[in-house]
Image (cartoon, grey):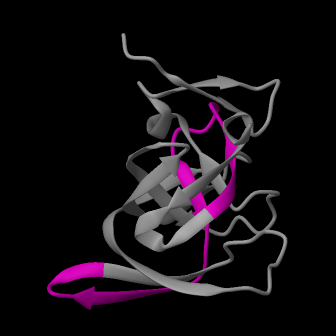
Amino acid sequence: MTQKMTVGALEFCSLPDLKIKDLHMRVDTGAKTSSLHVDNIKEQIKDGAKWVSFDIHPDYHDVDKIVRREAKVKAERKIKTSNEVSENRYVINTRICLKDQSWNIELTLTDRSNMSYLMLLGRQAMVGRIMVDPEHEYILSN
C-alpha cells in the first residue's frame, strides 16, 4: 500500500491549470464530488468542444478580487447538495496540488457563496491518496 498523505479538515491547495494558488479548501469525506465556487458562468464552443468561462474569488479574505478563467467541460451532472436539492453543474478536469504532490481531479462549478470555503474536496479526489484527520486543520502547512 502506498503512503497516503494526511490532511486536516481545512487545507490550502493550488489549482495550477486555473492559475490559483493558496486556496482555502474544506476537506469533506461526506461529499462525493469536489466543488469550486464560481460566478458568471458562460458556455462557449471552442474547436468543436464545449468550454465554460467563469469568475473566481481566489482569496476568501478579499471577495472583491475576481479573476476570469476558462476550462473545457468534461460533463454536466445532476448533483445532490447537502440540503438534498439537486442542481445541474458543469464538471471540469483540473490538477490539484497539495504540498509536493499533484494529480487530476474532477471539479464541479457551482455557487458556494453561502458556504464558508470556496472549495470543497470530495471523496473521489482523495481515493488512494489522502487520509483525513478531522481533529486538525492545515496539517500540510506545518
Residue 14 or 126: which is nearer the viewer?
14
Residue 39 or 104: which is nearer the viewer?
104
Q: Splitting the image into 4 quarters, where does residue 56 fall?
A: bottom right
Is 111 situated above or below 53?
Answer: above
**Residue at position x 41%, y 52% from top?**
106
**Residue at position x 51%, y 45% from top?**
33
Counting from the top left corner in percent of width and height, residue 133 is at 71, 23
- Residue 134 covered by magenta stretch: no
Q: How many marks?
A: 0
Judged from this view, the residue extending furthest toward the left is 48
The span shown in magenta is 22-50
Quick check: can you spot residue 90? no
Q: Splitting the image into 4 quarters, where does residue 93 fall?
A: bottom left
Judged from this view, the residue extending furthest toward the top is 1
Answer with left or right where residue 2 lies relative to residue 18.
left
Quick check: can you spot residue 12? yes
Q: Splitting the image into 4 quarters, where does residue 114 fall?
A: bottom right
- Residue 37 covered by magenta stretch: yes
Counting from the top left corner in percent of width and height, residue 3 is at 45, 17
**Residue at position x 52%, y 83% from top?**
54
Quarter of the image with the N terminus in it: top left
Counting from the top left corner in percent of width and height, residue 107 is at 47, 56
What is the chief secondary structure element of the magenta stretch?
Answer: strand
Answer with left or right where residue 13 lies relative to residue 70.
right
Quarter of the image with the C terminus in it: top right
Is 74 situated above or below 49?
Answer: above
